[in-house]
Image (spheres, helix red, strand yellow):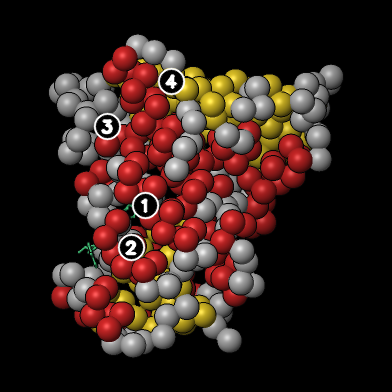
């Protein structure tokens, strides 16, 4: 039987989740919710379910919900998730949140802690690594094909003129890049970063820290680097991840598009394009959401959720360490105390 799914926040991304659930046989949308009545009503018609204008009213209705998507936004695209997520978790409903889990660490900690206390599955849509190509690359690492891991270089950049806060760029975009880095190389123990305010195409000075270069030391000794920008464009591509080890290296371009393996001792190159038939970034949404549904259907233990709330919290802690490094000029240690 399909899982009964509710969606909270029916903006652009809530409707992307909606389409993913409509197309997935593991899901049946039973409720949509938005504080903007027209958005909730429009989605209710599109998905053939009742509309609600608050989470409280949705819960009070007694409608049966197996799991919910949280697609609110707010300050730095994460400030709106806390209250409705706490309401859903408080009512015993597993939540798939959007990224960033929150733009404020104390709130992210409280959501993760409540999910843990209530033994609920809590995932975040860290969709960039839910691709067949990333899974193949991870298998290579796990089977020792790269040998002992040495270096990870990650680049993620888009054109985004948003100037709503000084650190919108790292807090809103880099949950994705840093999650990919953690997926391949594990926990980060130290971070250091430099930021730069770029110029627009028209030569106007930007207000937000729209470019960054960060160094990271991983628990397993890997040395990592992240390049990020909101002053990029389609011609630059979206992302590139390179991991090297004592025996080989891979380069993963644009999340799912081109995966290349190079052996250290010869010049042969093994290249896969569009592994698993995934052709572009848009397809990472149904892939990630399907995994969430699969894990809920299988009643996976909350600690085993791929792309969990805890993963997303650790990513935000690394982001805050980068910001602190820039503000203090220091290398910042991470301790992950909850
Ligand atoms: N995973 C990705 O690749 C990806 C890509 C883009 C955006 N996002 C994330 O998706 C989220 C949503 O982005 P968006 O562009 O759709 O935002 P949006 O502002 O267009 O939509 C958010 C909606 O939530 C509603 N809302 C706010 N508070 C609410 C509440 N308490 N109860 C019910 N509804 C509420 C708003 O009225 C609005 O309609 C953001 O967190 C953003 O960072 C993720």
**Residue beneath disc 2:** 86
Q: Quadrant of residue 67?
A: bottom left
Q: Quadrant of residue 227?
A: top left
Few, some or many residues within 10 Å of mark 4 (<14, 14–19, 20+): many
**Residue beneath disc 1:** 110
Q: Nearer the viewer, residue 118 or 270?
A: 118
**Residue beneath disc 4:** 332
Q: Spatial distance from mark 1 to mark 2, Cα to Cα?
A: 8 Å
Q: Closer to the N terminus: mark 2 or mark 4?
A: 2
Tag in front: 3 or 4: 4
Please tell me which residue is depicted at 53% across the width and 75% down the height of the picture.
Answer: 24
User: Where on the image, by quarter, is ligand 1?
Assistant: bottom left
Please tell me which residue is depicted at 19% across the width and 25% down the height of the picture.
Answer: 206
Q: In this view, does 73 lie to the left or right of 291?
A: left
Q: Where is residue 286 in the image (x, y as percent from the top left)?
A: 51, 63
Please tell me which residue is depicted at 29% across the width and 27% down the height of the picture.
Answer: 210
Few, some or many residues within 10 Å of mark 3 (<14, 14–19, 20+): some
Q: Spatial distance from mark 2 to mark 3, Cα to Cα?
A: 25 Å
Q: Pointer 1 and pointer 2: residues touching (CB < 8 Å)?
A: yes
Q: Closer to the N terminus: mark 3 or mark 4?
A: 3
Q: Pointer 1 and pointer 4: residues touching (CB < 8 Å)?
A: no
Q: Spatial distance from mark 1 to mark 4, Cα to Cα?
A: 23 Å
Q: Position of residue 244 (x, y in %)?
A: 69, 25
Tag in front: 2 or 3: 2
Q: Residue 167 carries which label?
A: 3
Few, some or many residues within 10 Å of mark 2 (<14, 14–19, 20+): some
| For residue 59, above or below residue 146 | below
Q: Quadrant of the C terminus?
A: top left
Q: Spatial distance from mark 2 to mark 4, Cα to Cα?
A: 30 Å
């Amino acid at each position: 039987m399909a899982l009964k799914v509710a969606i909270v926040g029916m903006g652009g991304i809530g409707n992307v989740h909606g389409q993913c659930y409509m197309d997935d046989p593991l899901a049946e949308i039973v409720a949509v919710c938005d504080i903007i009545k027209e958005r909730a009503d429009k989605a209710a018609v599109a998905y053939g379910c009742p509309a609600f204008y608050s989470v409280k009213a949705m819960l009070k209705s007694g409608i049966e919900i197996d799991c919910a998507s949280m697609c609110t936004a707010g300050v730095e695209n994460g400030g709106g998730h806390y209250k409705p997520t706490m309401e859903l978790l408080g009512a015993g409903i597993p939540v798939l949140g959007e990224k960033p889990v929150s733009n404020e660490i104390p709130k992210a900690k409280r959501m993760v802690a409540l999910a843990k206390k209530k033994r609920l599955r809590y995932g975040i849509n860290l969709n960039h690594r839910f691709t067949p190509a990333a899974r193949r690359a991870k298998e290579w690492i796990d089977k020792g094909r790269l040998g002992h891991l040495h270096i990870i270089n990650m680049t993620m950049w888009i054109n985004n003129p948003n100037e709503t806060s000084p650190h919108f760029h790292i807090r809103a975009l880099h949950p994705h890049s840093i999650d990919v880095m953690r997926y391949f190389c594990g926990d980060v123990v130290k971070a250091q970063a430099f930021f730069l305010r770029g110029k627009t195409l028209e030569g106007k000075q930007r207000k937000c820290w729209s470019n960054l270069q960060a160094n990271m030391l991983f628990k397993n000794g890997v040395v990592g680097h992240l390049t990020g920008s909101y002053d990029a464009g389609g011609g630059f591509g979206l992302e590139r991840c390179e991991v090297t080890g004592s025996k080989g290296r891979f380069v993963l371009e644009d999340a799912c598009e081109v995966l290349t393996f190079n052996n250290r001792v010869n010049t042969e190159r093994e290249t896969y394009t569009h592994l698993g038939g995934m052709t572009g970034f848009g397809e990472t949404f149904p892939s990630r959401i399907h995994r969430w549904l699969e894990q809920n259907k299988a009643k996976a233990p909350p600690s085993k959720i791929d792309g969990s709330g805890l993963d997303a919290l650790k990513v935000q802690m690394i982001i805050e360490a980068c910001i602190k490094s820039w503000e203090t000029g220091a290398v910042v240690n991470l301790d992950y105390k909850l």
